[in-house]
Amino acid sequence: MELERLQLVKDVIVDSSYTRTLFGDSSEKYVAFSESTKRSGKLFTSMSYEGEQIYTPFSNSTISWRKLMMDRSQVTSLFGAERLWAKGFTGGKVKMAIFDTGIRADHPHFRNIKERTNWTNEDTLNDNLGHGTFVAGVIAGEDAECLGFAPDTEIYAFRVFTDSQVSYTSWFLDAFNYAIATNMDVLNLSIGGPDYLDLPFVEKVWELTANNIIMISAIGNDGPLYGTLNNPADQSDVIGVGGIDYENHIASFSSRGMSTWEIPHGYGRVKPDVVAYGRDIMGSKISTGCKSLSGTSVASPVVAGAVCLLVSVIPEKTRKRILNPASMKQALVEGAFKLPGPNMFEQGAGRLDLLKSYEILKNYRPRASIFPSILDYTDCPYSWPFCRQPLYAGAMPVVFNATILNGMGVVGYVGGPPTWQPSDEVGNLLSIRFSYSQVIWPWTGFFALHMQIKEEGAHFSGIIQGNVSVEVYSPSLDPGGQRQISSCVLHLKLKVVPTPPRSRRLLWDQFHNIKYPPGYIPRDSLDVRNDILDWHGDHLHTNFHIMFNMLSDAGYYVETLGSPLTCFDASKYGALLMVDLEDEYFPEEIEKLRDDVLRAGLGLVVFAEWYNVDSMVKMRFFDDNTRSWWTPVTGGANVPAINELLAPFGIAFGDKILNGDFSMTDEQSHYASGTDIVRFPASGYVHRFQFQDSSESGATQNVLQASGSTKVNYSILGLLEAAAGRVAVYGDSNCLDSSHMVTNCYWLLRKILDFTNSGVKDPVLFSDSARRDLPLREDDSKLPSRRTDVNFSAYSSVVSKELTCGRDARFEVWGTKGYRLQLMGRNRKLPGYPTLDLGADLNGTMGGSNFSQGEPERKVEENPLEAPTRTKLGRSVDFLSLINREELDGSMFIAGQWLGPFIVGVACLALFVSYWRMRQRRRKRRKAPAPPAPQTLCSSEALPIGDRVPSPVRMIL
């Protein structure tokens, strides 16, 4: 027996006993977190739903799906599987690995169960839950009531989940190794989780697909929320499957894209790859008979069964040369039917079309391609969010992150620089730069376009069309043969408008966002019990997508900044949006933003979150999968850092955790675990409401505890005119975040932007009762302090990092320190953090991304400067130069690098002329020989070391 020869598997025994337990008997739905406590094992989301469990407030129809199902054909008929069966293709000689809860050995629905293995700590091979049996039935069942796609497929059941739906990374690693060793053809994993930085797991998936195993995985049941893709379905080498209903609507439970691996410094990929029917699908029960289940864990075996059928189409002797994870994905995405309603981050390429994919595979020749192959700004809503906002001159580059699929080999390379070929002359107004995988492995790589309109197109309105071409090559499959070469084409159709006025342009700060993974970033609303992590990306196109649409409908143009605040030109924007931010700030950012607001007239809008150290300490827990203690590295937002940013304006947030409802301008709003304002200058406008404070009792893992029923007035909203600019601050971002939102406050954001961008003062927001004649100033004890017991540098893009503008910034500042700054950077230790240096950046493991992550670390000796004055917030400031001198160690010049040398040159020339004139006068007065010329001050080398001329004064203009 193959298992006995390999001796790699435990618990491989003949075991015909089983427990008859129906999956849907209990109404309890599996969730990763129960009452805010993480379940045991690796972090996974829910498997599937039975019957009416799937109905939620987000359901897209009120049709009785059970009644509808009675009127429908088999799911196999909906995809035309009978036509392939009639040709003799039934999945024969295809080895199908099902990673799930196991299967009963003598189940009457399956004719070809080749092997069952158990990788858990339970002493059974059987399925006592029913999920694994159901998945196997969708793939290969032969019962007339619930037919599978490929009844002759050889089933290899890998039991990797216990009866309690618990699994560990180590179990998967063992099972994956055995799947590689036994040469599986296809693998289905109908489960996933948010941790794409579980590196042992992710790298083993790469190894598995590199060994030519086609992996299909469910995209997740966390819909309709965006940014909720599950791993491993979010990997480019895996076929990620979303779910639709029988009306071809995206199922409410199906997770939405984009991928979040790449942010904040890049842009996410299009996922899922395809969608398939996933609501009320019929499959095998645990012992006999059929039942219906719903979920993407059901849609995944629908695609896996179709893949087994397609694999059997290729003759076995040529199968390994033609079929691989890339070629199969090419057949699926190119054959898919694009649904008319959903966007690309909801449906991927579209609904699976089995017969078209069959036609593609039947005549397939190894090649490379790009997915998606078209970016069309006129194709709405499919091309959302790109079709929502046209290109225009002066904007931040728009990044489109496509995927290279290389069906020629597991390893490939880009043959040369990609080229842009416009279809007409106006296409020359488009400037494109490219980032791409240097090595395409396994089977796939990323291909990113950074697009901006040239300045000469500032008044252009119209369509730019053309093609981007890139050559991909792979080594020959035969020894000594010529390498394989393929040309890939990406078609572009872009809408361009004249540059909008400053008052309509907004900039979203993405750079200072930190999400899970890798760190334990806690949820923003502590009332949420079924999710303890902030993992949805906090991006305009993930969990803030509804807000993005609202701003677009209101006539605003919103751009994204994934680089430090020194990397944008404030004169072009009406306001900077800083929402739910967890990272620190470079001192150069703080100084530039102060200048941008006070002098350049930039509007500053800040939506903060809770931050309370005592509550964070109580949220600590032990994770038995990683065998480590998890502790929050910050709060809902990094309030101490935000306070330093706002200190030049006299504004600061406190450490309260406030909850409650309030009304303003006839609008009802909910304050969900927000913070309070404890400092605000006179002449500003501050709004106070009554809330309960939960900070004293704190938030444990299990429940958000209130300190009592008493409500007290707290300041939560402040508006200020600050010299040329305007500032607005609010203590809660939950009302803008579509994840776990109770009520929205889009109305408030619109009124704030009317003020910051156009100076329009709403009579309620700027009522006399809200105006402060005296400054609001609580004592220092009300200001939250940083945690000193966490290594924040492991998660931060600022602490111990270089200030560098990345590839999401304007082309002219790529790789520099930003606008008006010419600084030599160095690693910095911020107040309140211990000096810990882990060396390698955790984000450097994300698929070899080409997005700039900063320059190599430099060690620079500090200049001995006079001790500066210390602020209340601990930042050292020299009030003469308005520069944090202890944080700088290079030359900064007024108006750029040329001005310092120019001043020195003028001084030298003036000194020389003065000396020459003095010498001429002396010659006229007396004919005696002139005295020796004194040393000039043109060069510091002319003076003794102790008398060297000091360096130019460091300033920011």
Image (tube, rainbow, N blue to C red):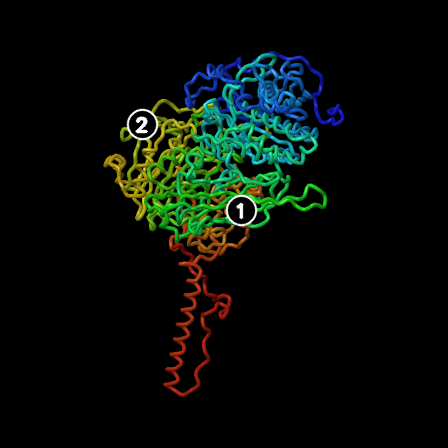
Which quadrant of the rendered structure holds the N terminus?
Answer: top right
Q: Which residue is mark 2?
A: 668
Tell me the tag on residue 653.
none
| Towards the viewer: 160 or 632 | 160
What is the three-letter code of the residue carrying label 2? Gln
Q: Is residue 442 visible?
A: no
What is the three-letter code of the residue carrying label 1? Ser
Mark 1 or mark 2, which is nearer to you? Answer: 1
Precedes in sequence: disc 1 or disc 2 = 1
Whether tag 1 and tag 2 are in contact, CB under 8 A, the answer is no
Give above or below for 608 relative to 742: below
Q: Where residue 760 sits in the image (x, y, percent)?
A: 27, 41
In the rendered view, does 484 fall on the left or right side of 665?
right
| Pointer 2 local density, CA inside 10 Å: few below 14, some 14–19, many at least 20 | few
| Towards the viewer: 151 or 265 | 151
In the rendered view, does 281 fall on the left or right side of 873?
right
Q: Secondary structure at mark 2?
A: strand
Give above or below for 551 relative to 111: below
Q: Secondary structure at mark 1?
A: strand
In the rendered view, does 719 fall on the left or right side of 184?
left
| Towards the viewer: 600 or 541 | 541
Residue drawn where x is 55% and y is 45% of the image: 436
For residue 934, which quarter of the picture? bottom left
Give above or below for 210 relative to 497: above
Q: Is residue 343 visible?
A: yes
Marks 1 and 2, how far apart in space? 53 Å
Q: Where residue 874 sits in the image (x, y, percent)?
A: 43, 44
| Pointer 1 local density, CA inside 10 Å: few below 14, some 14–19, many at least 20 | some
Q: Which residue is mark 1?
A: 469
Residue drawn where x is 59% and y is 48% of the image: 415
